[in-house]
Image (tube, coloured by chain):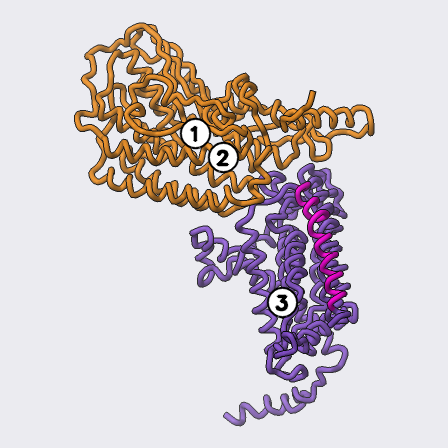
C-alpha cells in the first residue's frame, strides 16, 4: 500500500504547499473578486427569484408554486435558465441587429457595476470608493440606456412605448432617490458606503441628555429618507405599482416583447440582480449594513459573519419590495410623474433641509 | 357654455390631439393594433387605435375573429340540440345562455315547466352569474397590474363550479335544460352545500372590497375614467351593469313578467350615478352579493314536485314566433325564435347578446383617453369574446 502511495506523495512534495500561496497578490485578489462577482450576482438573482417571485407570491395567492424541480422546486429557476439557453435567439426581421443584441448586455453591465461598491464586511468589498453611493446611483441609471436601446431596436410599437415610459420614469425617480440619499450623506459625513456603515455603528442618540441609546441605524433618524428611497427604488426596478414599462396587460411585455432565449434571461437577471443590489444599498444606508453589534469593526470574523448579516437585511428589504409588488395595482404614467415631481421631490428637499439644520444644531 | 362632464373634456382633448397631429407639429401619429392577440382582450378582439403620444385620437373595434355562426347552425338542429350550441356563447356563465332559449322553445311548444324546474333554473342562473362576475371582480385587478386578486377569484369560483358540476354534470357547459323541464333533479345534500358556498362568496366580496375597492391607486385609476352618461349609454344599447352604473334603474329580472322565480324573492337592484369604471365595478360587486342572497332564498323556498312537464306527443312544433330575453351577467340577452311548423328545428334564431352592444360604445368612449385607460375601460365594460362574436 505504501509502495503505491509513495510516488503520489513524491509528486505532491514537488508542488508548492498551499500555505505558501500569497492571496494578497494582485492576481489572486482579482481572481477572487471575479469569482465573487460572477457568483454573487446570479446567486442573488436566483435567491430573490425563487424565494419571492416563485414561492412567496404563490403562497400569498393561495397556491403552491413550482414543486417538482428539486425539493419544493428550488431548482426551478436553474431549469428555466437551461431552457432559455437552449432556445433560438430570434431577431425580428426589421430590428437594428447590433443595437438589439447589445441592449441586454448594457442592462446587465449596469447591474454588475452596482455590486462594485457594496461592502459586505470591513475588507469584503470589491472596491471601497470614496464616492461609493454617488457611483452606485450613477451606474444604476445606465440601465435605462439599455432599455431605450432595446425598445428602439426591436422595431415594435409596444416595445417603443415601454422604453419611452421607462426613460420618463427613471428621470422622474432618480431625483427623489438621490435627494433621499443626500440626507444620509449629510448625517454620516461621507459618501463612502463603508464609511456610512462605520458612522452608523458609532451613531448614538441621546434622549434629553438623560441616557443614550448607542448604535442606532439611520432608519430611525432618516425614516422619511428611507421611505422615499424605497418608493424610488420600486420605481427604478419597474416593480408594481410602477411597472408601466413592462405593464403586461397594456404593452404585452414592454421593451422585452421581442426578446427570447438567453437575451431575455439577461433582462431577467438584470431585473432581479438590480433588486438584490438596491436592497443591499438600502440595507447599507439605512439598516446598518454588515455591522454586527458587539463585534469589533476590524475583526476577521466580521468578514465572515458580515455578509450573512447583510444577506438577512437584504431579504428583509426585498420582502417589502416584493410584498408591495404583488399587492398593488399600477399607477398611470401621468399619475406617477405628478407624484414624483409634486410630492416626493418637495418632501425630500424638506428632508435635506431638516437634516442639515439638525446636523448643525446637535 | 361650461363643459363639466369628464367625457366631454376627454373628447375635446382627443380633437385637440388630432389637430396637433394634422396642423401644428406635423408629426405623424402611430396606429397601434391592440389585438387580436393581446393579453388585455382575453380572446380575439382587435381594437385599432390611432395614437398621439399615449393619447388616443381615434379607436375602432374590429370583431368577428371568433365568429362561429351559431344563428345559422341553430337552423339545422332540433330545439333540444341547440342548448349545446348556445352554451358556448358566454362561456363563463353557460347556464344563463340556455335558459332564455329554452323558455322561447317552450312558448313555441306551448308547454310550461313545473314550478320546481323553474326554481332550479333560477337557482343555477344566479350561480352562473356568481361564477361569471367573481372572475370579473378579480380580473379587473390584473388589468390594472394587481396580480393577486384574480387568484382569489379563481379559488372561490371553483366552489361554485363544483356545485354546478354536481347538479348538471358539466363544469362549464351544463346542457341541463330540456324543453319542458330539466335533465335531472338536484343531488342529495346539494342545497346545504350551496348555502355554505354562498358564505364563501360573500367573504370573497368582502375581500375584494378590502383589496381593491379601498385601494387608493385603484380608485385613482378607476374614478372618472370612461364616464358614460345615461342618454349616451342608452343610445348605444348598453345593458346590464354597464347601464345601471350610469344611473338607469333597469333590470329585466324585476321589470318584466317572467316564469322564473325572481318575483318570489326579496332582493334589490343596485345603481350608481357616476357612470365611470369605478361605478361599474361597484355595481357588479353589489350584484354578486345580491345573487348570493338570491341563491340562499331560492334554496330555502325550493318547492317539491316533478321537474319535467308532460310533453305533447307530436313531432311538429306549431307555427309561431317567440321572443324571450333575460338579465344575464353581461347584460340583456334575448332569443327571437321563429318556427315554420316543420319537423326540424327553428326556422330562424336571432341571438341578441349583451357584449356586442356593450362594446359598440368603444369608438365614442376611447376618444382622448390614454393607453392605460383604454385597458381600464375595456375591462370595466366587461365583455366575453364568445358573447361578441357568437
Res A220 label: 3
Res B281 label: 2
Kindly give the residue lying farthest to the bottom in the view shown: A2
Residue B58 visible in the current orientation: yes
**Circles 1 and 3: CB distance less than 8 Å?**
no
Give residue A142's quadrant in the image. bottom right
Residue B66 shown in magenta = no
Q: Which residue does the image show at 47% across and 38% down from the upper left?
A: B137
Dot 3 and dot 2 within a common chain: no
**Residue B241 drawn above or below residue A185:** above
Residue A40 visible in the current orientation: no
Task: Compare marks 1 and 2 and give the one earlier in the sequence.
Answer: 1
Give residue A323's quadrant in the image. bottom right
Q: Which residue does the image show at 28% across and 15% down from the upper left?
A: B106
Q: Chain A takes which shade in the image?
A: purple
In front: label 1 or label 2 = 1
Which stretch did the figure color magenta? A333-358
**Circles 1 and 2: CB distance less than 8 Å?**
no
- Give whichever of B51, B368 is nearer the camera: B368
Q: Label 1: which residue? A: B270
Chain under numbered label 2: B
Tell whether B326 sits left or right of A29.
left
The x, y position of residue B189, in whole percent, is 21, 40
Q: Chain B takes which shade in the image?
A: orange
Q: Secondary structure at mark 3?
A: loop
Amino acid at each position: 500500500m505504501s509502495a503505491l502511495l509513495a510516488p503520489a506523495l513524491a509528486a505532491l512534495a514537488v508542488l508548492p504547499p498551499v500555505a505558501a500561496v500569497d492571496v494578497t497578490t494582485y492576481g489572486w485578489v482579482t481572481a477572487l473578486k471575479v469569482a465573487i462577482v460572477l457568483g454573487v450576482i446570479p446567486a442573488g438573482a436566483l435567491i430573490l427569484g425563487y424565494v419571492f417571485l416563485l414561492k412567496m407570491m404563490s403562497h400569498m395567492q393561495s397556491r403552491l408554486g413550482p414543486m417538482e424541480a428539486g425539493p419544493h422546486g428550488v431548482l426551478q429557476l436553474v431549469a428555466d435558465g437551461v431552457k432559455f439557453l437552449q432556445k433560438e435567439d430570434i431577431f425580428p426581421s426589421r430590428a437594428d441587429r447590433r443595437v438589439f443584441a447589445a441592449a441586454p448586455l448594457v442592462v446587465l453591465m449596469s447591474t454588475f457595476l452596482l455590486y462594485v461598491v457594496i461592502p459586505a464586511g470591513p475588507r469584503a468589498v470589491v472596491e471601497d470608493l470614496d464616492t461609493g453611493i454617488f457611483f452606485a446611483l450613477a451606474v444604476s441609471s445606465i440601465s435605462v440606456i439599455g432599455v431605450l436601446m432595446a425598445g428602439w431596436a426591436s422595431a415594435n410599437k409596444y416595445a417603443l412605448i415601454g422604453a419611452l415610459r421607462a426613460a420618463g420614469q427613471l428621470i422622474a425617480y432618480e431625483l427623489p432617490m438621490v435627494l433621499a440619499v443626500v440626507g444620509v450623506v449629510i448625517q454620516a459625513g461621507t459618501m463612502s458606503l463603508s464609511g456610512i456603515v462605520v458612522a452608523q455603528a458609532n451613531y448614538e442618540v441621546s434622549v434629553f441628555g438623560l441616557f443614550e441609546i448607542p448604535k442606532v441605524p439611520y432608519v430611525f433618524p432618516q425614516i422619511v429618507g428611507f421611505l422615499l428611497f424605497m418608493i424610488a427604488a420600486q420605481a427604478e426596478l419597474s416593480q408594481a405599482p410602477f411597472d408601466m414599462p413592462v405593464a403586461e396587460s397594456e404593452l404585452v411585455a414592454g421593451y422585452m416583447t421581442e426578446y427570447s432565449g438567453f437575451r431575455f434571461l439577461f433582462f431577467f437577471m438584470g431585473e432581479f440582480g438590480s433588486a438584490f443590489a438596491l436592497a443591499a444599498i438600502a440595507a447599507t444606508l439605512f439598516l446598518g449594513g454588515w455591522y454586527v453589534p458587539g463585534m469589533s469593526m476590524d475583526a476577521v470574523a466580521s468578514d465572515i459573519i458580515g455578509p450573512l448579516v447583510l444577506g438577512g437585511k437584504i431579504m428583509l428589504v426585498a420582502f417589502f419590495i416584493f410584498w408591495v409588488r404583488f399587492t398593488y395595482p399600477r399607477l398611470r404614467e401621468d399619475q406617477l410623474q405628478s407624484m414624483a415631481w409634486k410630492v416626493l421631490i418637495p418632501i425630500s428637499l424638506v428632508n435635506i433641509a431638516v437634516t442639515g439644520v439638525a446636523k448643525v444644531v446637535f | 357654455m361650461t363643459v363639466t362632464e369628464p367625457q366631454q373634456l376627454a373628447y375635446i382633448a382627443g380633437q385637440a390631439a388630432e389637430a396637433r397631429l394634422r396642423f401644428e407639429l406635423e408629426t405623424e401619429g402611430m396606429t397601434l393594433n391592440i389585438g387580436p392577440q393581446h393579453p388585455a382582450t382575453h380572446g380575439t378582439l382587435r381594437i385599432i387605435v390611432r395614437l398621439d403620444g399615449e393619447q388616443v385620437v381615434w379607436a375602432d373595434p374590429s370583431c368577428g375573429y371568433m365568429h362561429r355562426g351559431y344563428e345559422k347552425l341553430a337552423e339545422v338542429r332540433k330545439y333540444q340540440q341547440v342548448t349545446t350550441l348556445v352554451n358556448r356563447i358566454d362561456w363563463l356563465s353557460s347556464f344563463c345562455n340556455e335558459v332564455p332559449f329554452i323558455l322561447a322553445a317552450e312558448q313555441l311548444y306551448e308547454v310550461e315547466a313545473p314550478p320546481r324546474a323553474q326554481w332550479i333554473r333560477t337557482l343555477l342562473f344566479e350561480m352562473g352569474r356568481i361564477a361569471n362576475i367573481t372572475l370579473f371582480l378579480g380580473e379587473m385587478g390584473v388589468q390594472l397590474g394587481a396580480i393577486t386578486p384574480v387568484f382569489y377569484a379563481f379559488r372561490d369560483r371553483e366552489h361554485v363550479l363544483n356545485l354546478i358540476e354536481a347538479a348538471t354534470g358539466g363544469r362549464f357547459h351544463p346542457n341541463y335544460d330540456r324543453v319542458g323541464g330539466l335533465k335531472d333533479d338536484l343531488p342529495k345534500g346539494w342545497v346545504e352545500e350551496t348555502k355554505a358556498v354562498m358564505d364563501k362568496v360573500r367573504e370573497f366580496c368582502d375581500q375584494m372590497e378590502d383589496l381593491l375597492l379601498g385601494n387608493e391607486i385603484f380608485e385613482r385609476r378607476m374614478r372618472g375614467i370612461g364616464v358614460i352618461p345615461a342618454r349616451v349609454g342608452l343610445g348605444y344599447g348598453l345593458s346590464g351593469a354597464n347601464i345601471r352604473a350610469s344611473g338607469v334603474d333597469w333590470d329585466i329580472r324585476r321589470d318584466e313578467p317572467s316564469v322564473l322565480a325572481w318575483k318570489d324573492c326579496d332582493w334589490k337592484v343596485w345603481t350608481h350615478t357616476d357612470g365611470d369604471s369605478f361605478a361599474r365595478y361597484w355595481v357588479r360587486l353589489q350584484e354578486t352579493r345580491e345573487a348570493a342572497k338570491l341563491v340562499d332564498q331560492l334554496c330555502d323556498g325550493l318547492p317539491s314536485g316533478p321537474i319535467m312537464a308532460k310533453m305533447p306527443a307530436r313531432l311538429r312544433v306549431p307555427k309561431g314566433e317567440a321572443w324571450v330575453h333575460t338579465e344575464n351577467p353581461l347584460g340583456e340577452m334575448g332569443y327571437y325564435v321563429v318556427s315554420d311548423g316543420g319537423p326540424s328545428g327553428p326556422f330562424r334564431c336571432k341571438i341578441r347578446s349583451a357584449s356586442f352592444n356593450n362594446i359598440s360604445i368603444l369608438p365614442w368612449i376611447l376618444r382622448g383617453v390614454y393607453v392605460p385607460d383604454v385597458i381600464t375601460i375595456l375591462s370595466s365594460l366587461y365583455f366575453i369574446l364568445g358573447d361578441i362574436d357568437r
